Image (cartoon, rainbow, N blue to C red):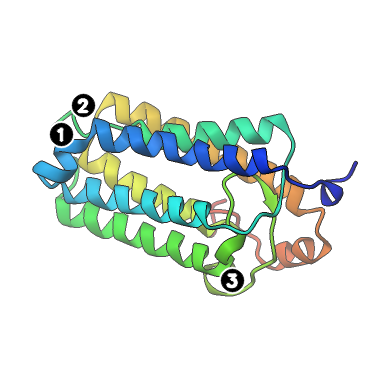
Amino acid sequence: MTFNKMKNSPIQEYVEKIIIIIPYIYFIHHNYSSIFISVNIISILYLFEMILELFFTLFRTPGKMSHNTTDWILAILGTYAAQIVSTHASDTHLASVTFCFILSFIGILVSFSAKICLGRSFAIVAAVRVVKTYGPYRIIRHPMYAGYMLTSLGFLLYNFSLWNICTIFCAWSVQILRIQAEEKILFTDPEWSLWSKQVRWKLLPFVY
């Protein structure tokens, strides 16, 4: 059975939403004091990024998601690894709050612009989407992941600890694997395959 012939079941749609809701609840609970009491602006930006992703996931249009177990595992690991970071692990700041704010804010703008381009076809699990060739997609193939990385880097520099290094490194590693998994599916779309030849860089111009 080809991917294009597959249809999502209602259970798949619900599971995808649960995947994203649970770790976000954990992040808010674990970092409550930092976000709502001491008002750590970098943590608030990180939370804002999560809220945007949650909103687009909850109100997405059902589409053709992957039925591959590995793709679902990558989606779960990528989502959870990014949200088990901690603001309590260390008081070490490798950069000023201003620099981290700018870095995180640029990341949010990049990922948000990508979400706007995708609209309701946004998904957590690898899926066939309508090809977008404008906005940040004119520069790189996966601007949403690039935005996530910038935001998480800003968070890490301001909340530097071994725990956060490990979790964010794992999240980034999984994102690379998610890109590879998504492109295997997206290459089944002739329009996407043609567009990808024009946009060479996947994540970071002149690097990857």
Indicate which label's residue lies in the foreground, 2 or 3. 2
Residue at image position (23%, 52%) is 100
Q: Earlier in the sequence, mark 1 or mark 3?
A: 1
Q: Earlier in the sequence, mark 2 or mark 3?
A: 2
In the rendered structure, which amino acid carries the disc numbered 1? Thr
The answer to whether residue 150 is above or below residue 190 is above
Image coords of residue 117 (percent x, y): 55, 69
**Please, what secondary structure does the residue beneath circle 1 have?**
loop
In the rendered structure, which amino acid carries the disc numbered 2? Ala
Image coords of residue 140 (percent x, y): 57, 62
Density class for disc 2 (Cα within 10 Å; few <14, some 14-19, many ≥20) is few
Which residue in the protein does label 2 denote?
89
**Marks 2 and 1 in Cβ contact (< 8 Å):** no
Residue at image position (68%, 41%) is 181
Image coords of residue 8 (percent x, y): 73, 45
In the rendered structure, which amino acid carries the disc numbered 3? Arg
Density class for disc 1 (Cα within 10 Å; few <14, some 14-19, many ≥20) is few
Which residue in the protein does label 3 denote?
138
Image coords of residue 107 (percent x, y): 38, 57
Residue at image position (35%, 31%) is 84
Which residue in the protein does label 1 denote?
92
Residue at image position (66%, 36%) is 71
**Please, what secondary structure does the residue beneath circle 3 have?**
helix
Image quadrant where residue 125 sits: top right
